Amino acid sequence: MVQRPSDLKGALQAAIAAIDSNLRDVKAVNAVPRTPEKFAKLRATLESALHAAENGEPINKASLTLISKWVADWIPNDDDPLLDRLVEVEQALGLP
Amino acid sequence: MNVYGFADGDPVNFSDPMGLSPCPAALKVACGVAGRVGGKLIARSATLGALASAGRALLDGNRPLSNAVAKTFEKGQYVASVLNRDITVQRVFGGESEALGRFLTPSAPAADAVRGALQLPAGNAATHIADVVIKQGTTIYTGIVNGSTTGATQIYVKSLDALKVVGERPIP
C-alpha cells in the first residue's frame, strides 16, 4: 500500500512499536551477535526521524534509504512484521 | 514434436503456467513470476551451476518472500531453487553489516562499483568481502538487484543457520 506523506508519523510510530515488540523477545534478539545493538541503532534512527516529522524539520532521508533491506539482512525472523512497517516508512518518504 | 517441450520433456516434475520457462512443480509459487529471468541468471554464473538439477525438494512450505525482500529484486522477480550441494558465494560487508547476513552475491563487483551494483544500504560500509558457504538443501532466492547500476545478481537466504563464513578480506 502506498502511503501519503501525512502517514509518515504513523508509519514511524508503528515501526518503533514493532522494534519494541522484538526487544521484548530477549532470547530471539540475542540469538545473533550484535542484534540488540542493531535494534537500538534502528530505533534511534526512527525516533530521530519521528522527532523531525513532529517538529516540521527536515528528515535525514539518507539514514532511512534501503533501511528495510538492511534490517532484512540480519533480523532474527526473516518475515517479521517490522519489515512491512519499514517499507511503509520508505514509501511515506518516497524512497525506493 | 515434443509436446512436453515447455517442461523440458518432464511434465510430472516441471510446469510452465505462464509460458516463461519450466519451473519445478514443487517451486511453482515462487518460480512462476521469476522464471523469466532464471535461465539468464544461471547462465551468468558458473557458481550457480549447482542449481541446474536442483529444485525438487519442497520450498519452505511454498511461502514466498516478504514484500520487503521481494522489492530488493528488479521488478520483484526472483528464482527460488534448492541447492543439491554446498556452494560458495560472496558477501560485501562492513560497518553495521557483518560477514554473516542474508544478502549474498555470486561474485563481488569491482570495488569502485560495488555500492551501486549491489544497492547497499547506508549501514553497510562495504569495506570487506566474505566467502560464504550455503549448505546443501537450502532454498536460495536469486535475481537482479533492484536499481543496480550494473545488473548485478544477488542471492537471498532466509535462514542464517544455512550459512557459514569461511573467509574474509578487506576490499582493496
Image: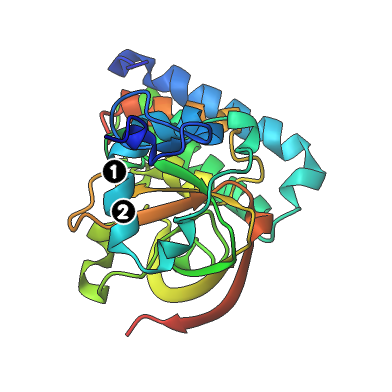
Left or right: where B122 falls relative to B88: left
Q: Dot 1, crowdedness within 10 Å: few (<14), some or many (≥20)?
A: some
Q: Where does residue B99 sit, x and y in percent of width and height?
A: 54, 68
Residue on which disc 1 sits: B37
In the image, A9 versus B105, the foreground residue is B105
How many angstroms separate mark 1 from mark 2 (CA)?
Answer: 6 Å
In the image, B79 versus B167, the foreground residue is B79
Left or right: where B7 falls relative to B131: left
In the image, B170 versus A89, the foreground residue is B170
Q: Which mark is residue B98?
A: none
Whether residue B65 is visible: no
Residue on which disc 2 sits: B41
The secondary structure type at the circle numbered 2 is: helix
Q: Where does residue B15 sit, x and y in percent of width and height?
A: 43, 30
Q: Where does residue B123 sit, x and y in percent of width and height?
A: 43, 56
The secondary structure type at the circle numbered 1 is: helix
Q: Which quadrant is home to the C terminus of chain A?
A: top left
* Residue type highlighted by circle 2: Leu
Q: Dot 2, crowdedness within 10 Å: few (<14), some or many (≥20)?
A: many
Residue at 54 percent of width and 58 percent of height: B101
Host chain of mark 2 = B
Whether residue A87 is visible: yes
User: Residue placed farthest to the right in the image?
Assistant: A27
Q: Which quadrant is home to the N terminus of chain A?
A: top left
Residue at 27 percent of width and 66 percent of height: B114
Q: Where does residue A39 sit, x and y in percent of width and height?
A: 60, 46
